[in-house]
């Protein structure tokens, strides 16, 4: 689980960094291609993580059966989070 979460963190960081770059270089086709690739990988990684461990946050996850299951999981900053690994 930690490896998957670390990979997702790295991908999300790279996406934000590239988005900032693209704000000032909007015609850089290589950066756009790399950004799209990273977003695809991050979405795949996030989907895999959430399928196995539950939603990471409320605003990027679909609610199953109108049940806010994300609130029932331990938060990443809580001590219970790592004991569930």
Image (cartoon, rainbow, N blue to C red):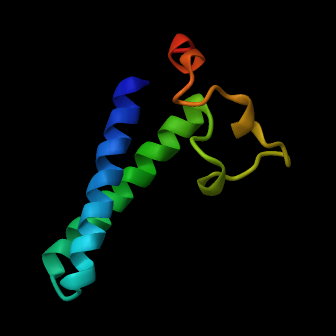
Q: How many marks?
A: 0
> On screen, 50 above or below 52?
below
Which quarter of the figure has residue 71? top right
Q: Residue at x 83, y 43 (%)?
A: 67
Q: Residue at x 62, y 34 (%)?
A: 54
Q: Residue at x 24, y 67 (%)?
A: 18
**Quadrant in which the N terminus is drawn:** top left
Q: Which is nearer the eye, 6 or 48?
A: 6
Name the outermost residue toward the bottom: 27
Name the outermost residue toward the top: 83
Q: Which is nearer the eye, 4 or 14?
A: 14
35 lies left or right of 70: left
Q: Residue at x 17, y 81 (%)?
A: 29
Which quarter of the figure has residue 50? top right
> On screen, 4 above or below 29?
above
Q: Which is nearer the eye, 34 or 6?
A: 6
> On screen, 10 above or below 15?
above
Q: Position of residue 27 (x, y in %)?
A: 19, 88
Q: Position of residue 72 (x, y in %)?
A: 74, 30
34 lies left or right of 84: left
Q: Position of residue 19 (x, y in %)?
A: 30, 71
> On screen, 54 above or below 2?
below
73 lies left or right of 68: left
Which quarter of the figure has residue 15? bottom left
Q: Position of residue 17 (x, y in %)?
A: 25, 62
């Amino acid at each position: 689980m930690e490896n998957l979460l670390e990979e997702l963190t790295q991908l999300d960081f790279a996406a934000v960094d590239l988005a900032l770059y693209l704000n000032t270089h909007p015609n850089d086709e290589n950066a756009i291609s790399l950004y799209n690739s990273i977003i695809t990988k991050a979405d795949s990684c996030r989907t895999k993580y959430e399928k196995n461990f539950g939603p990471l946050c409320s605003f990027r996850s679909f609610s199953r059966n109108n049940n806010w299951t994300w609130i029932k999981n331990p938060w990443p900053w809580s001590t219970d989070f790592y004991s569930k690994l």
